[in-house]
Amino acid sequence: MGFVAPAVGIVAALGFLVVLLYKRANLGIVLNATALFLGVLAVDWIEIPRTIYQTSIDPLTISVVLATFGIMLLSQLYKETGLINRLGESVGRLINNPKIVLGVLPAVIGLLPVAGGALMSAPLVDIEAEKLKLKPDRKAYVNLWFRHTIFPVYPLSPPTITAALLTGVAVPLIILRQIPVVIVMIIAGYIIGFWKVSGFKNREKTSEKNRPSSDLKDFLVSFSPILTTIIVTMALDLIDPDLSQHGFDVVIAVFIGLIILAYISKLKLAVFKMPFKTWGIYGITFAAYGAFLLRNMMDKAGISSIFSSFVVNGSINIILLLTIAPAILGVLTGSPAGAVAVSVSILSGIFTLPFAPKVAALAYISAYLGYTIAPTHLCFTFTADYFKCSLGRIYKYVIPSFLVTFLTAILVYFLF
């Protein structure tokens, strides 16, 4: 047995996790260190190496780690080859409404799930927002909020993939339930972000008659690696559902997407090596492994039995466990994958695997929305720093947006 009771160990481990995150430690190190810290406190020590080994050979863990590494590599190469700039600029030229551009640009660049990636869209948002004379706090809000509208319905989002595999629910089933939530998220962002903001009527017109078709071609070419990856993932799910259940559909699709990117960008070996020289790609991959290790260590500590007894005794409402608990974990950890991993461990003593799609979807979106508004969220802090405004000034826009979206997610749970 460990040093302390499981409940005490879990509370101490979560406190340890929060402290490391507020110290800006790398998420991969945080999740793995927290799992080991919990093991030392509340698990029989002989189970610690056994749990690490079982996690390391688990096909689901392997597939998520490989998929996360591939997605991060695709994201970094988009940046290093300049394709991300080409993609953003083509969107800006195709759409003549700055308000729509401001909503679309962060979302499109959000297709690349890089930690703190809002910093990539911030310069483009700044340029478009100046045409509408937006204040810095509104610029920051628009950049942050619209960047995160895409992930809940994006099949290549690592947190979505992790949530699907941990809960045993197929990615499309989770995404389908998030569509109305995302629609409300976009509407809320548009109303709050552009309230009493007049349109921009003096946009420059191009003198080239064929410019729209050229811009469309630029967009399709620069978007093709991502689009190909999504299409191949969906096709593999239809052809061989076992690939999806084990998570290898995304691994194969991302590999094909990398080949497309290498071809259209005429990728040179020196550029290809660049992502491997930075810690970022390894840190996020290590975090994917850490999410599974933390989930497994919490299972060994008996977290599910602790909370299931609370539910049986009527001390805790199940809906609170599906909403408030994941949202708080998302705020505390600043990590949707970490919050989902802990939430699934809590819920596994109440719901049998695979979870019902509505249960998996609500737990995931609750954790995701909590992460979106978290002060530990890198996109939030980077955006505030770029636009030179305090977090408090952004929160006056973020909080009402969060509440409307969060209530919609709960409503979807009860209606469908």
Image (cartoon, rainbow, N blue to C red):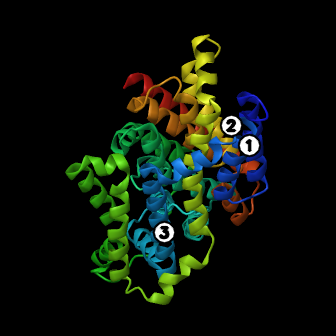
- Quarter occupied by residue 321: top right
Residue 43 — which label? 2
- Does residue 60 appear in this view? yes
**The N terminus sits in image quarter:** top right
- The residue positioned 62% from the left and 10% from the top of the image is 313
- Name the kind of residue labelled 1 in the image: Val
Give the foreground label among 3 and 2.
2
Q: Residues within 10 Å of mark 2 (few under 14, many from 20)?
A: many
Which of marks 3 and 1 precedes in the sequence? 1
- Tag 2: amino acid: Val
| Mark 1 and mark 3: Cα distance apart in space | 36 Å
Q: Position of residue 187 (x, y in %)?
A: 47, 43
Q: Which mark is residue 75?
A: 3
Name the amino acid, label 3: Ser
Q: Which mark is residue 40?
A: 1
Q: Are marks 2 and 1 in contact (CB under 8 Å)?
A: yes
Residue occupying image coordinates x 58% and y 63% = 117
